Image (cartoon, coloured by chain):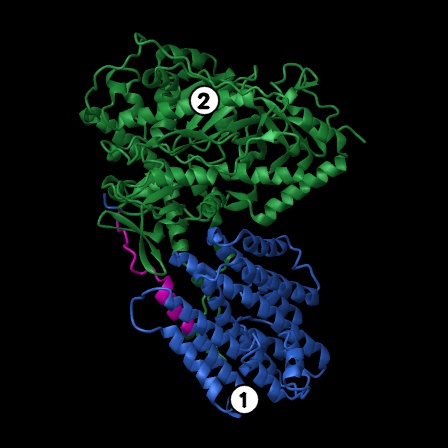
Amino acid sequence: MLSRIAESLFWIGRYVERADVTARILDVQTQLLIEDPFVDEEESCRALLGIMGVEHDGPVDQRTMLRLLLSDVRSEASTAATLGAARESARRARETLSTDMWSAINTTWRAISTGRVPGMRSAMAFDWVRERCSVINGVAGTTMSRDETWHFYVLGRSIERADMTARLLTTTALAGVPSGGWNATLRACGAYEAFLRTYRGLEADEAAAEFLLLDRLFPRSIMSALRTAERCLEDLAAAGPRVGFGDEAQRLLGRARADLEYRPLAAILTDLPDEMEQLQVTCSAAAEAIGTKYFDTSEAIHWAGGLG
Amino acid sequence: MTDVFQGYDQGPGAAYDEMFSGGAVRREYHAVHETFLRMPTDEIVTRADSVASSYLDQGITFGVGGEERPFPLDIVPRLIDMKRWVEVEAGVKQRVLALEAFLDDIYSSARVLSEGVIPRSVVVTSPHYHRVVAGFSPPNGVRIHVSGIDLIRDDEGDFRVLEDNARVPSGVSYVMTNRRAVASALPEAFSEHRIEPVNSYPRRLLAALRAAAPVGVGDPTVVVLTPGVYNSAYFEHSMLARRMGIELVEGRDLVCRGGRVSMRTTRGLQPVHVIYRRVDDDFLDPVHFRHDSMLGVPGLINAARAGHVTIANAVGNGVADDKLLYSYVPDLIRYYLREEPILRNVDTWRLGDDDAREEVLDRLDELVLKPVDGSGGKGIVIGPRAEAAELDELRRKILADPRAWVAQPVISLSTVPTLIDGQVRPRHVDLRPFAVNDGNDVWVLPGGLTRVALPEGELIVNSSRGGGSKDTWVVSDRRDATPVPKVVPRRIGVDGAAAPSDPGPAMASLTDDEHGQQQQQQQQQQQQQGLDRLDHRGLDRLDHRGPNRLDHRGPNRLDHRGLDRLDHRGLDRLDHRGLDRLDHRGPDGLDHQEASC
């Protein structure tokens, strides 16, 4: 497939996942603010903006945070802007997407661009974003052939998922809420019941963190996301002969996974935010390596005309 | 229940109405009329709204001013009786064949010029005559793989040709989407008819493109080349690629090496054999045309000349779209095909002729004046609606460059009932049938795109002036079992006036003077398009910023708490306004104002 299209698919996967998890993170954050009257609103909102990579001068309250991360299309980290970017990428790859998938993405974007979503109550908007992302992923799952198109889409989604789950864990760890915080995080991931079943009702913060970090079977865990990404890379590499040696992205992701898998949990939890930051660096580097290998058009012949 | 047709007033001196004749419903419209008569107005409006919202959800849009806008689809279909259609079909085929012969001729021996059928200057002063493709014949001889011949119906209901589009005509995607939408919105009326289907278009197009592959290529790779997402017809480009199951490429996806064209894929460079291009000649290859174009592929023309890749439609077809040439097409049909034209032209005065110019200058306020090279409807003046100052200005322009203008009488386009604010009202329409030439046969898509001028009394079907479209049904009468007779063109005798003689001198014999004129003309063209040049630079910058650069969180961006700063360049910052200017330039734009006049 065209490199440009592969790149678009990779980014559709990333953007949709980013919008989804951003809504989930906001859900956790607002619940924590509501449930714990002792949390410093300003400090905690500012911390979240930092985690999401948003720079903001001036006072920060919950409303500002929601505007910047949820509804404002001009704020690049917001779900609204992210879904807009997904739609723009989809438009560029439209001929390769199924009509259903394009429609799912376009309808989502239309609800934002016509102001329907920005006008919603925040809790409803979180639900709406999650639901739309589920629809897009669901349609993708049933209408896309498991060819390169699919591998690039899932690759983007998995790398983003590892990155975003890392941010979600950081949010909870930094909130410094002794108990209850992890429950909210699990719920936001749709992981609460799965967690209870897996750990037979044994609730502990450490176990919750372990579940979201390391569970091999739960699809939103970092471990699961990394393994999926690795598998996609394997499938892509198997598809045909390649130039160069090995696969840098695979090496980076594999090392990060092994690092999590073979170290004692306690060692990881000691400084969870730093560990998660390191993981984000890895995700970023892996994405770059994928770009170099599959999307790069630097060998383009440049026409330096205009003299005639 | 109120009758949605109540007060449908054609008025005295009104244009030909396609549904009603003196208050009576024309035969082919009976079922449609009945359907609307039976349906409560609320229901009609609800169905029309659902059509509109389904277009928005599916993103069936066209670009205007850098924005994606839905292309309004009126719920009342436009019907063409099969008997009438076969005449249109035969007329379109005939015209395409004559234009094919003409293009082949002027890029080879140019007999038509040496025999004086048309003046040499008509061809050599056309900015779309490209000497770079002279002396080169495309693989299966086809140059106009796809054409859109714009038609109107005059006061008598007769179809007449308004203009030819042999470059990159657009709009065919709406023919297909309109059909699907109206068939589901009006199943009652739909099932009452035998309607010629339109969904075989992509298959026909792909077959024609494959048939045009370079010699010796058994299983050609065909691609659609688009200027990109900011082109007004991007929806169409992506739809055609999707429906043909082939890649939609941009210039930067292609690379020319050693006279061969490849595309960049995740598995390296893959050869490309046929390019259905939706990029204008001027922007197709910076080596030969505009040096600043980033929409094209350097080296493409040489690859085509070397016979390794086929460009469809062929480069240089624009000569056939020239409005001055248009006035000679009936002569070309007689000359090349030895047939009488089946479809008539609209009367046209050539202002290069002294007598014609004198007459036209006297009657400027009653005529429509069109620049011969005006694409996208630019520069058209409708005399009766123009201010005196505008006419004075026009007069000066005509005297300064008479070759650049033609004049036509104001023709009242036919009307078709159209849903306006819950009532059905007469609105003017035109028709663009699409023809595909695979080298063996010219196939005409039954029906074509009907464009409708939505504002009352408006003669301009231009989409940026609130123009919309209608589903166009070519219908057979079920009660009528007799086969529709074929339309046979009237042959001209062997001793007809325009019998061909021996081949004349080749185009290489252009005099220096003519050559100079041509260069001058092209330079003027470039100056006029100076603004556009900026836009291309803009587009290029934007396009080379892949999706990842719209939003890339690079590893070295990790600064506070090790968390990266988003390095987005927001989508809203894309310079839509600049880019959009591109869209208005295309000869294929759906924006042709001239379509109405």
Q: Amino acid at mark 1?
A: Leu
Foreground residue among B537 and A110: A110
Q: Position of residue B100 (x, y in %)?
A: 34, 27
- Residue in the picture at 36% in, 11% down: B492
Residue A221's disc is: none
- Chain identifier, colour blue: A
Does residue B532 appear in the picture of this structure? yes
For the residue pair B27 and A21, the one nearer the viewer reads as B27
On screen, residue B144 above or below B222? above
Q: Position of residue B66 (x, y in %)?
A: 50, 46
* Chain coloured green: B
Residue A269 - label: 1
Q: Which stretch did the figure color magenta? A: A286-305
Q: Is residue B103 magenta?
A: no
**3D distance between C-alphas at marks 1 and 2:** 79 Å
Q: Is residue A83 visible?
A: no
Do badges 1 and 2 share one subunit?
no
Residue B7: x, y in percent?
74, 23
**B220 relative to A133 in the view: left or right:** left
Under tag 1, what secondary structure? Answer: helix
How busy is the neighbourhood of tag 1: few (under 14 within 10 Å), some, or many (20 plus)? some
Residue kind at label 2, given as amino acid type: Ala
